[in-house]
Structures are given as C-alpha cells and as structure tokens.
Amino acid sequence: MTKVLVVDDDVVSRMMLMHLIDSSGKFDITEAEDGFDAWGRLQAGLRPAICFCDLRMPRLSGMELLQRVRADPALAGLPLVLVSSASDRATVQQATLAGASGYVVKPFEADHVRAHLASLLGGAVRDLPAEAPAATQARLGIDAPRLQAYLAGFEQQLAMAPSDIAALIERGDQQGARARLERIGAGCATLGLHGALAVVRGLEAAHLSSAAVRAALDEVLDALQRQAALVR
C-alpha cells in the first residue's frame, strides 16, 4: 500500500488532509505533529511515497524540513508538497525554488489534493471529476457532435504536449513549459474537465520535470477520454 506522510502542527488541518487523502484511494497514512517529528521519523527509516507538509510550524518549519530532505541523498527524491494558507506569488515562488514538488493552499480543495497525488504518484488516483457533458453543451451553446469534435481536437493537442513540454524543460525554458500548461488548463476549463484542470494547476505550482508533466498529462488524457465516451 502506498505510504503518505502528513505533517501539520494543527490537529484539525492534519485530520482534514488525512481524510481527503484517505478518500482518494488506498493509502497507508502516517502523521507527524511538526517538522521535527517528521524528520525524526524519516531518519528512523520511514520512506513515504509522498509527503504533505505544512509551511509554518514550531521547532522545524515545512521549509526547513524541505531543505533537510533535499540535502539528504537518501531522501532527496521524495516528492514533498508544501501546505499553507498563504497563496501569494512570493511564497509560492520561494517554495518552488527550495525544491517543493507542489503547493496546496488552505482551506483544502479535494480536487487539488487528488491532483498532487495523481501527478506525483504516477497516476495512483484516476477518478477525476468533470462537468456533465449536457451541462458543457448548454454552457457552450453547442450540440453533442460539436463537443465530440472539441474533445477530439484537445486529445490531439494532449498527445503532442508531453514531448513538446519535455523539450522546453530540457532547454531550461520553464516559462515556455508553463505557458503550454496554461493553454492546456484553459482547454480543461472550457471543456468542463474540472479534475484535470486541478492536475494542471498542481503542476504549475511546482518546479517542472519531464516525468511529472508526463504523469500528470496522462491523467488529463484519461479524464478527457472518459468524458468523450460519455458524449458518444
């Protein structure tokens, strides 16, 4: 069973996040009351597949824990998502530069948490919510064949996106890669793929890697194909 570490000094926030994770699939969840507690567990041999960690905590903050994890060769590859009520660009950028794998803003949104689980665990969560096709047709003022055509066009775009974005990342063009992801996010929003949009936004909050982008866009493609099947 996939291990997840949840670190937060606020008991209510910690329990809420654990509940959202638990409702997203089969996970073995370990909780830690602050960064110091989490660091002790990691040093003792705990190896979670992913860690969700509050940013501001006593004894050892989330940022300090992140720095320790990234400096430890045995832990450096651990996907670590920072959690905070702060959503300003400076804080998110600081987290990204420090090596955070993602950023979740309180109060928690289930889709956002699931998006991080999906993108960072290679598709462990694949039940992404979407708008009912009839509602999408009514909102856009189109019929079912036209919606099918839009979905087919978007599917072609998604098929090319992972390799194109990987090329941008390899050239060090994070801005260009993010611009491509923003266009994909706009497509998700237009077509009512709410869960897929959350996956894309989860990527936008992290330092991009080719592997994370490919895993996330696989989730988006899966959601799109399921939506297309409902239209037929």
Image (spheres, rainbow, N blue to C red):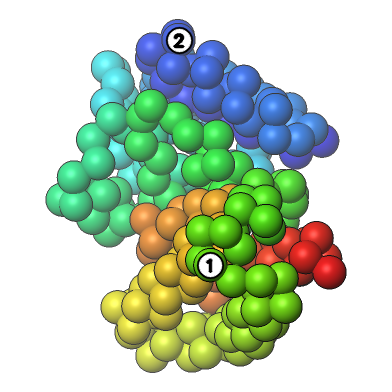
The quadrant of the image that shows the N terminus is: top right
The residue at 52%/89% (across/down) is 164
The residue at 79%/33% (across/down) is 26
Q: Is residue 157 left or right of residue 25?
A: left
Badge count? 2
Is residue 57 in view from this perspective? yes
Residue under circle 1?
141
Q: Is residue 49 left or right of residue 165?
A: right
From the top left corner, tell me how far across and down residue 114 is, in percent: 60, 42
Residue under circle 2?
12
Q: On the image, which quarter does residue 31 sit in?
A: top right
- Kindly report the distance in space between the C-alpha atoms of the residues bearing marks 2 and 1: 43 Å
Identify residue type, mark 1. Gly
The residue at 67%/56% (across/down) is 134
In this view, the residue farthest toward the left is: 90
Residues at discs 2 and 1 in contact (Cβ within 8 Å): no
Tag 2 secondary structure: helix
The residue at 43%/68% (across/down) is 186
Question: Is residue 143 depicted above or below 30 in this figure?
Answer: below
The quadrant of the image that shows the C terminus is: bottom right
Question: Is residue 52 depicted above or below 231 in this figure?
Answer: above
